[in-house]
Amino acid sequence: MARSDRGRNLLTSWQTWALVGVLFVLIVLVLWYALENPRNQTFGNTVTQVPVKQKVVALTFDDGPNPPYTDEIVDYLHAQHVPATFFVVGRAVVQHPESVRKEAQDGDAIGNHSWDHAHLVLERRPHIAREISMTDAAIQRATGVKTRLFRPPFGARDYAVISVARHMGYQVIMWSVPLPKDWSSPPPSVIRDRVLPYVKDGSIIVLHDGNRGMPGDRSSTVAATKLIVEALRAQGYWFVTVPELLRLGYLEHQSGASPSAPE
Ligand SMILES: [Zn+2]
């Protein structure tokens, strides 16, 4: 083979690999957008930003209960009269029912975050339904509360995940403030600074008091929670649970939809 042919073959194979690489990255990006981007509504309606005129936000905590961090957060929020919403993992609820009971007793809302934090888009419908119903039973045993809120693990959902949850009577709750990656324990001020620029009226913020339903150090999140509450309070925000935020959004929608409705 002539030297120039070898050069051309080399170039061709280099270009082919570059093309394969670009295509691969594109496919991953499209898949991520479709399955995990919180704003994507392709597979069915989910809640992200709630359109309200009031200066209110919803703080949500995922993956617990995970004592002592969950309890520290709950105690702090209770002392500050700040209600929040906890999306709990079933296998952790049966380990620490007292932590979830405390959330409910303090006026926090509870949401379902699956049994074992599985990637539900990889599972069949009966499995998805079982994850949700087992967690629902654990929450009810621990608290007496029947939740109507569901957040898929990793935010990953497709048509099956959303339709199963909705058929079971759940609203699928995502978020509007980008995840601050508090699970990797950056300094609390870093977590705060990743959250604050994105907060608007009706925002839903996600922090992690737990670790996919297993033990894990969340002291950074505990400290960041205090910084975020202080900063948003200073900006004039009020904190509401997700059900309350949905109610405010519904009222807003009603008043906007029928301005001349009879009294
Ligand atoms: Zn999670």
Image (cartoon, rainbow, N blue to C red):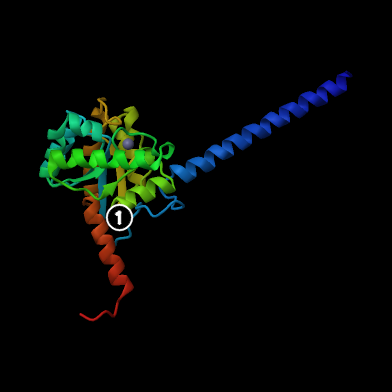
The quarter of the image holding the N terminus is: top right
SS of the residue under disc 1: loop
> Is residue 100 in sight in this rendering?
yes
Q: Is residue 206 left or right of residue 5?
A: left
Give the x, y percent position of residue 92. Answer: 22, 31
Q: Is residue 255 left or right of residue 163?
A: left
Give the x, y percent position of residue 211. Answer: 29, 29
Q: Is residue 110 left or right of residue 13?
A: left
Q: Residue furthest front?
A: 126
Residue occupied by mark 1 = 202
Q: Quadrant of residue 210?
A: top left
Q: Residue furthest right?
A: 2
Q: Nearer the viewer, residue 83 or 237?
A: 83
Q: Quadrant of residue 78?
A: top left
The quarter of the image holding the C terminus is: bottom left
Q: Quadrant of ligand 1?
A: top left
Crowdedness near tag 1: few (<14), some (14–19) or many (≥20) residues, C-alpha within 10 Å: many
> Is residue 55 in sight in this rendering?
no
Q: Name which residue lies at 23% across and 28% down.
A: 219
Q: Amino acid at mark 1?
A: Gly
Q: Nearer the viewer, residue 214 or 170?
A: 170
Give the x, y percent position of residue 21. Answer: 63, 32
Q: Quadrant of residue 25?
A: top right
Query: In the picture shown, does residue 166 fall above or below 215?
Result: below
Q: Is mark 1 within 8 Å of ligand 1?
A: no
Q: Is residue 240 left or right of residue 75?
A: right
Give the x, y percent position of residue 117. Answer: 33, 34
Q: Nearer the viewer, residue 113 or 223?
A: 113
Query: In the picture shown, does residue 24 fall above or below 10?
Result: below
Q: Nearer the viewer, residue 146 or 19?
A: 146
Q: Name which residue lies at 12% across and 34% down.
A: 98
